[in-house]
Amino acid sequence: MGGRSAGSIERFDTASRPPYHSFVNSLSIYALGLELDASLAGAVVSAVLRWPEAATIEIAGAPLARLHVLYHLREPELCLLSDPLGPTRCASRSMEAAEGRSIRRVRPLDLERVLVVELGASAGLGGSGEAKLRIDLTPASRPLALYDGGAERPAASLGPRRGRRPAGSEHSRAPKPYSLLSLPETAPAAIAARADAGAESPEAPEHTRRWKGARALASALVSSVAGIDPALAAAIVREAGADPDRAWAVLAEIARRLASGPRAWHVYRFAESPSPSIYPLELPLAERGERMDGFADAFAVRARESAVPGYVEHLRRRASQHARRDTKRLEKLRENLAGDLADAARSSEYRHFGDLLATYRHLLRAGMSEITVKDFSGDRSVTVPLDPSRSPDRNIRAYFTKARKGEKGAFIIKDRALAVDRDIESRRAEIARIETLRSAADLIPLVPPDSAPRGRGRGDDEPRRFRSFPIDERHTAYVGRSDGENDILTHEFAAASDLWFHAQDVPGSHVILKGAHRSTPHAVIEKAAAIAAAFSKARNSKTVPVIYAEKRHVRRPRKSKPGAAVCQRSKTIFVKPGIPGEADET
């Protein structure tokens, strides 16, 4: 492999990391494919591991032990690091059909930032024929895909597709007009014309026209020449003084050095790029790069300074997102409890109003909105608001009811507010602790599993898409997070015998109780109903009516929006909102 071994995943300081990301260029991926072809020939794929928004190809029998594909950003990244991303127990095996296969060849797909790893036949009993692992660092395809033989569709894939799919098959893309692998001798007229058009602003000052012309020329090079990334294009235009012919001469020299070899890996730190740029040659520029001992060292520099810190920052956000969401919910609950406590403090005033109305009952008439009467002391008049839609006796009872609730609920609300304050402090302490972590190995165990890919099927990972709350050994409640998830949870994931719950007459999440049967204990049904109440607009009420029914009696209305459901043969249960595991708020 040449040079020192690939770097390891250590603790990286992300405080000074640039706020955005520049992708690894196609020139380095093309040369990397040629390097890996020589380094990995005859090695064996021992496993493909899946991490949060990342995957690792583990290799046995080669100096390079692991290839990490990070796909947390729109542009995936390839890292050559010796250590695993995190604890092995936190990874799941994937693409098991690739395990045990020998690597016959690694080839770049021209300058498209795509590597194709050709695998031999499986060594196991009944082993299948040849296969291919495709590592795609463009946003339009899955970052990692396994193909059986010459199949056009992948047998398995990992990662999202964060862009528009290109025309044609998964194995081909419309190439750019020109390429560093076959560059014309002279600059095409179209590129010069685009640069001239960008500089055409008669009313603008000379320096503005030069700046616009340079920017147009750099843009033309990126969009027309395969192998040229934006940072390199800007450096070439700067070197050439925005002259198209001189810029093309620099391109021609780069193409000559690329073809003649041997590869000399360099790290450049262009002002236009927030991340170090690596190239398999010394660029013919005034700006000098740092010479590396080999491709592994060059990719290790990029991993340490850009790729891994960015991934760690992403993991930190993922690890703390639930705590941040809970903190926001608890702060809103605390605000509501403060209002309830202020309302409870008026219990003596409500009882006084009730006593006055009972004393002056003979003056009350239906439809009155208020009444002014003498206080019991006789020193002042008191105006008592009334509900004109209620009868006099109902107005009297309403004030006594509010007084009793306030007198009884003040202590409960204070205890509940204290419990919420403790929960808020706990969540904030958890967020602060997560912010101190500096390595992927520390953060990955704290990150919830990846959501299952959207679709109509029900794979083994399907329940991970929803919130889940185990109630006992047999029963688990699943909660939708949005209208789309509610729709999938109810109409695709739920079985006919599962119980469906929803807060009555208020917006809220759908809840499915898995494991339900005819003899499900009433206490389990109450807990599932409490969860449905907790994930509804009535979550801050003391008692919430919740309807429930077997899923077989719930249907989707025709031409309705996602998340709509019509329930027949339902029952109603009154519960206090609550989530299993939270502090008892009674």
Image (cartoon, rainbow, N blue to C red):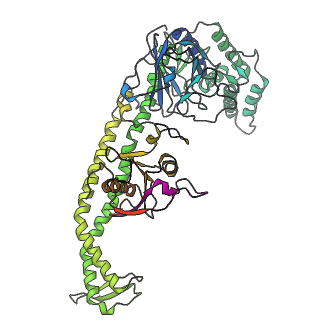
In the rendered image, residue 552 lying in the magenta stretch gets the answer yes
Q: Quadrant of the C terminus?
A: bottom left
Give the quarter of the image for residue 252: top right
Taking depth in this image into account, of 17 and 343 the one nearest to the observer is 343
- Residue 537 visible in the current orientation: no
Query: Relative to residue 561, is residue 127 depicted above or below?
Result: above
Q: Give the x, y percent position of residue 359.
A: 25, 89
Q: Farthest residue in the left direction?
A: 377
**Number of marks drawn:** 0
In the rendered image, residue 538 lying in the magenta stretch gets the answer no
In this rendering, would 155 be left or right of 427?
right
Query: Relative to residue 50, is residue 410 depicted above or below?
Result: below
In this rendering, would 183 be left or right of 505?
right
Residue at 26% x, 54% y is 584
Q: Give the x, y percent position of residue 103.
A: 53, 13
Q: Give the x, y percent position of residue 13.
A: 38, 28
Q: Give the x, y percent position of residue 511.
A: 42, 52
In this rendering, would 460 be left or right of 581?
right
Q: Farthest residue in the right direction?
A: 189
In the image, the segment drawn in magenta is 544-569
Residue at 26% x, 50% y is 422
Query: Relative to residue 583, is residue 22 depicted above or below?
Result: above
- Residue 40 visible in the current orientation: yes
Taking depth in this image into account, of 468 and 159 the one nearest to the observer is 468
Q: Farthest residue in the bottom direction?
A: 362
Taking depth in this image into account, of 355 and 514 the one nearest to the observer is 514
Give the quarter of the image for residue 244: top right
